[in-house]
Amino acid sequence: MSGRNWLGGVCLRNGGYVTILESLAHYRRRLCTLGDSPELKNAAMFAPVLTSQAAKTIPEIDRTTQDVLDYLAGGMVDIDVAFLDKALACHDSDIRKAQDTGDAYYTNLIGDMERAAFLLEMIASVRKGLSEYD
């Protein structure tokens, strides 16, 4: 398939939507705070390019979030599974960085670190579910 489909109602309706929406919100926060990222500070010459890409991606996050909400309300939508996977991967990566490094940027971005281990399991489960429907 092309990476776009109806997303498999089982994955979304069986709780996957909570993790997906949370990961999309995290991805948005991550891009909005990109300038504070330790990685970007270490590679300042790439900052303008990455900031520009982030500005282009944020509206896509908003559209995808609305698409998921529309789907849950009973609408038929075509959701980019690869984009959802990117948001889930970002969330997973940042949780791991927060756990491994304890860096204030990541711990503030993640918030509840006690819940983070549970989120890692949920993210892995949703990513597996999405790959089954794609």
Image: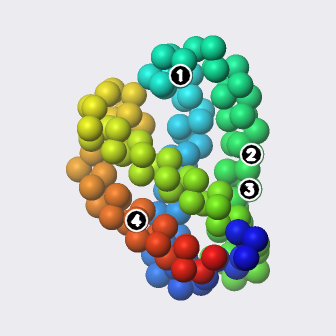
Q: Earlier in the sequence, mark 4 or mark 3?
A: 3
Which residue is labeled 3 in the image? 63
**Residue position for label 4:** 124
Q: Which circle marks residue 59 in the picture?
A: 2
Distance from Cα at disc 4 to Cα at disc 3: 23 Å
Q: Position of residue 68 (x, y in %)?
A: 65, 68
Q: Earlier in the sequence, mark 4 or mark 1?
A: 1
Q: How far apart are marks 2 and 1 (CA)?
A: 21 Å
Q: State which quarter of the image contains the C terminus.
A: bottom right
* Sequence-earlier tag: 3 or 1: 1
Who comes first in sequence, dot 2 or dot 1? 1
Q: Quick check: marks 3 and 2 in contact, CB under 8 Å?
A: yes
Give the mark toward the camera: 3 or 1.
1
* Residue 88, numbered label: none
Q: Where is residue 89 in the image (x, y as percent from the top left)?
A: 49, 53
Callout 4, which amino acid?
Ala
Amino acid type at circle 1 is: Leu
Mark 2: few, some, or many residues within 10 Å (few <14, many ≥20)?
few
Up the image or down, 78 lies above or below 103; here it is below
Q: Residues within 10 Å of mark 4 (few under 14, many from 20)?
A: some
**How crowded is the residue under tag 3: few (<14 C-alpha within 10 Å), some, or many (20+)?**
few
Considering only order in the chain, which callout, 2 or 4, is on the residue closer to the N terminus?
2
* Residue type marked 3: Arg
Q: Marks 3 and 4: in contact by CB < 8 Å?
A: no
Separation of marks 3 and 1 at Cα, in angstroms: 26 Å
Q: Relative to residue 74, is residue 33 depicted above or below? A: above
For mark 3, give the secondary structure.
helix
Q: What is the total number of numbered labels drawn onto the structure image?
A: 4
For residue 72, side relative to residue 39 (left or right): right
Q: Residue at x 56, y 28 (%)?
A: 34
Does residue 92 appear to the left or right of 68 in the view shown?
Answer: left
